[in-house]
Image (tube, helix red, strand yellow):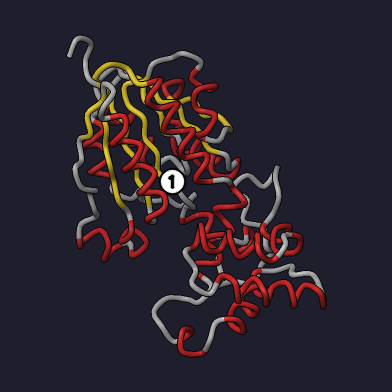
Amino acid sequence: MSVHVPVLGAEVLQWLQPRAGGVYVDATVGYGGHAAAILAAAPGGRLIGLDRDERALAGARERLAAFGARAHLVHADFAQLGEVLAGQPADGILFDVGVSSAQLDDPVRGFSFRADAPLDMRMDPSRGQTAADLVNTLPGPELAEILLRYGEERWAARIADFVVQARRRRPIATTGDLVEIIRAAVRAGARRGPGHPARRTFQALRIAVNGELDALRAGLAAAAAALAPLGRVVVIAFHSLEDRIVKTTFRGLGQHGFAVLTKKPVRPTAAETAANPRARSARLRALAREGIGA
């Protein structure tokens, strides 16, 4: 297994402040990079790792094997955090939200617009609708709304119209099929702009397929309820829609026994973004539960 370097690894430890004997949750454990660092920084501590992707969990089990029973991994979405913890208080909870580099780099998963593959995009391939299901069945106005709301795509209505026309001829089955439709829909001048013309559409469909924003809201609420006094929640978000939810949620909790620790999001260093360009959009925010009687 290749070792995946976690984004903002040092900053996560700085804001989460793992301590000996503590109980920690990595709500999006992925391949275990952050989890391994947390366990190493918390001698005798325990970590509960959640992920909806069984392939990622297999990688995490391998990476965290040296920690033995201190690491407990669960196949679950972080929206199920409250159910998984079942009343167990946590001293720290980490969310690293969005699609992982491993998922993007595996063409079979259908997350990337740079490789032709089945149009899937499910983080948990064992359940739920695929992106192909959405683009082949949703009415045009509903599809346009998804592209606008979750992708902030200025060409949403035109792309949706082109999708509806294309699927009348034959089903849209692959990422390559969808990319060609998007290229045709987006006017030439816009195609020459920065970034791939399919980027926002793929983001929007991925969020819709996986219910990511609703899951984030539910996960943050469960984390706040589970946090022990003086415990901390740390969230890494990668685009404005996620970060806005985190910022708004933290601001509201700041009026009810919590303290927002990061007035502005923490960003990666220049050295990290040079080594890992995908880190450049990462934004970290941290929250702490106040002590009893504080």
Outermost residue on the front side: it is 141
Q: Residue furthest top?
A: 293
Q: Count the marks: how many?
A: 1
The image quarter in which residue 276 lies: bottom left
Q: At x 52% / y 63%, what residue is drawn?
A: 148
What residue appears at the point 74 percent right and 77 percent down from the top-left corner? 166
* Residue type, label 1: Val
From the viewer's side, name the closer residue of 263 and 15.
Answer: 263
Q: Where is residue 196 drawn, in percent x and y?
A: 47, 76
Quarter of the image for residue 27 reads top left
Residue 215, x across and y down, in percent:
52, 39
x, y percentage for residue 2?
46, 52
Q: Which residue is mark 1?
A: 97
- Which residue does the image show at 36% across and 30% down from the upper left? 93
Residue 214 placement, left or right of 181? left
Counting from the top left corner in percent of width and height, residue 60 is at 49, 38
SS under mark 1: loop
Decide: few, some or many residues near mark 1? Use Cα within 10 Å; few <14, some 14-19, many ≥20.
many
Q: Is residue 173 above or below residue 284?
A: below
- Against 226, residue 59 (above or below) is below
Residue 51 against residue 167 in the figure, above or below = above
Relative to 4, is 211 on the left or the right? Answer: right
User: Measuring 56% from the left and 70% from the top, which residue is drawn there?
Assistant: 156
The front one of 46 and 287 is: 287
Task: Judge left or right: residue 171 versus residue 190.
Answer: right
The C terminus sits in image quarter: top left
Q: Residue furthest bottom?
A: 188
